[in-house]
Image: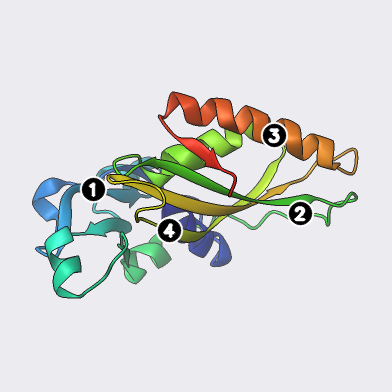
Amino acid sequence: MRARVDRLLAEVGRAPLAWGAADAGAVPAWAWAGRGAAGRGAGADAAGEPVARVLALDPRVARRLEVAADVAVALVDVDALLALPAGGRAYAPLPRFEGLKLDVALAVDEAVPAGDLIAAIERAGKGLVADVELFDLYAGEQVGAGRKSLAWHVLLQAPDKTLTDKDGARFLGRLEKELEALGGVLRRE
């Protein structure tokens, strides 16, 4: 969800936020205390009020709403967002070489944050990860009690060559090792 907020800022020409833990005293009653992040502007704005907060929905509220999966909510202060200095939009040329898109499903303990999984994907990509997008979250008997499976679209892109299936297989091998460190596995069903 933080990545979505950062993309929103990029779309309106603002620099990315500096993210940190959300202040537990400022968490609304519907949010899960201790499971949130606050984004502040860089520089002098970093000590002020957050421009955006990403908060997990309290499990009791989720049950009352009959929401089966983890839910996060992004709160963005539009006035504070527009007050941020312009970050300037950088020109990015179209890639010269075709990318390789892989769908990966990662099963981990429920307590493992999605941000840790994104970091593991990026480390396994060794600089080739051009985009990561979450498209499914599953918790049920197929992954076991206390576990969840997150499925991601991963785009690998090299600046100097077209990537092959062999490059994809090497990425998946490195990703399996990264997941072992997090107590997770790459789902291959």
Disc 3 from disc 2: Cα separation: 25 Å
User: Disc 1 and disc 3: Cα gap in Å?
Assistant: 30 Å
Q: For the N terminus, which image quadrant?
A: bottom left
Amino acid type for the residue under numbered disc 3: Phe
Residue 108 as seen in the image, left or right of residue 171:
left
**Residue 35 bears which disc, if any?**
1
Q: CA distance from mark 2 to mark 1?
A: 34 Å
Q: Position of residue 48 (x, y in %)?
A: 25, 49
As drawn, the label of residue 171 is 3
Pick whichever of labels 1 and 3 is earlier in the sequence. 1
Residue position for label 2: 92
Q: Sequence order check: which comes first, mark 2 or mark 1?
A: 1
Q: Position of residue 116 (x, y in %)?
A: 43, 37
Q: Amino acid at mark 4?
A: Leu
Answer few, some or many: residues within 10 Å of disc 3's Cα (few below 14, many 20 plus, some between 14 and 19).
many
| N-terminal label among 4 and 1 | 1
For this rendering, which residue is in front, 93 or 66? 66
Question: Mark 4 or mark 3, which is nearer the start of the sequence?
Answer: 4
